[in-house]
Amino acid sequence: MNKVGYLGPKGTFTKMAVDGLFDEIDSVSYKTIPACIDAVNAGEVDLGVVPIENAIEGSVHLTLDYLIHHVDLPIVAEATVPIRQHLLVHPSFEGDIGDIEEIYSHTQAISQCHQFIHQNAPQAHIEYTASTGQAAQLVLEKGARTAAIANEKAAREIGLKILKSDVHDYPNNHTRFVVLKQDSQPLSLEHTEKNGFKTSIMVTLPRDYAGALHQVLSAFSWRQMNLSKIESRPMKTGLGNYFFIIDVNQEYDDVLFPGVQAELRALGCQVRVLGSYPTYVVSDEKIKQLNQ
């Protein structure tokens, strides 16, 4: 049986992704995204599950940058999970939102609920945590006039009560999680709803010159390869130096992708395949079952 590491503690959305993807899996909680990724890299666990993008707040830059700059671990699967953020308080709390003095949560969760906090709890001091599960645990320990933004699973497992449900600013809130492994063999999960196949590529331009990005995209375009995402991130080597993450909605093959790589390298680009992997969807019904 594979051992899976995830961003913990219990009650995080990442743990929900793990439970939605795997049946009867041995899972290990890690306090931070880098710690989870390092555990896969060191062989402490066979697989690692970490968040990579949210529909409201965009990419989880810590995950992307760590995969690019610190380890060489392929993505072997992806899962999209519906996200419902709730305002959780200590079970002894009897006030209303205006009585809350501190709100704890992960930076992504706080950002997903920015307008709710601004309009309903402007008096509250925001404290950022490594995960939503950790935020819930802190509220249990501190009690008093503290609150956490986290999910229903955290409320149930840690023993908090939901003061206000669905406090995220936009209803279509989903997060993509990636599964990491030391080898690049795609992960097949027969009991989970499959939603296609994707190949992620990192491209570094040789220099900043007019039309460089257009030439890169043309290598995909004339081959009629559909791109679902292109994002730039700093190389961390100086201002103006960027690499690009490109997601292609198809499996790596022996014709089109080698042709793209050869064409890009002829332009002077550096190219690295981050993974070619199946994409899965954890349904609302599955999440409801997990929260029971």
Image (cartoon, helix red, strand yellow):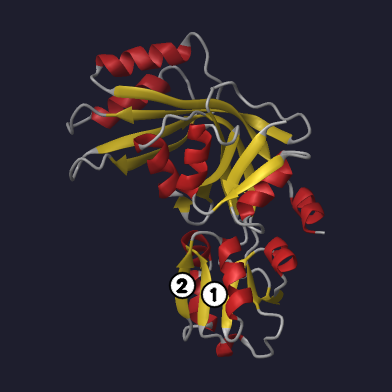
Compared with residue 194, is residue 262 higher up or lower down, i.e. above or below? above
Q: Report the disc number at residue 116.
A: 1
| Residue 282 seen in the current view | no
Q: Callout 1, which amino acid?
A: Phe
Query: Up-down: is 255 above or below 218?
Result: above
Across and down, in percent, residue 101 comes to: 51, 85
Quadrant of the rendering where the C terminus is positioned: bottom right
Task: Say which mark, if any, is on residue 127.
Answer: 2
123, above or below 71, in the image: below
Q: Residue 214: which quarter of the image?
A: top left
Q: Nearer the viewer, residue 9 or 22?
A: 9
**Crowd around label 2: few <14 · some 14–19 · many ≥20 (10 Å):** some
Q: Position of residue 16 (x, y in %)?
A: 68, 51
Is residue 241 left or right of 51 when viewed as pictured?
A: left
Point out residue 180 in the picture as x, y percentages from the top left corner. Answer: 55, 34
User: Which residue reaches farthest top?
Assistant: 255
Instruction: Determine the residue positioned at 57% across, 81% down.
Output: 146
Q: Nearer the viewer, residue 143 or 115?
A: 143
Q: Quadrant of the N terminus?
A: top right
Query: Secondary structure beneath disc 1?
Result: helix
In the image, is 110 to the left or to the right of 272?
Answer: right
Circle 2: element type: strand
The type of residue carrying mark 2 is: Glu
- Residue 89 image label: none
Neighbor class of circle 1 (other Cα within 10 Å; few <14, some 14-19, many 20+) is some
Tell me what residue is drawn at x 56 percent, y 21 percent.
251
Viewer-proximal residue among 205 and 223: 205
Earlier sequence position, callout 2 versus callout 1? 1
Residue plotted at (25% across, 43% down) = 236
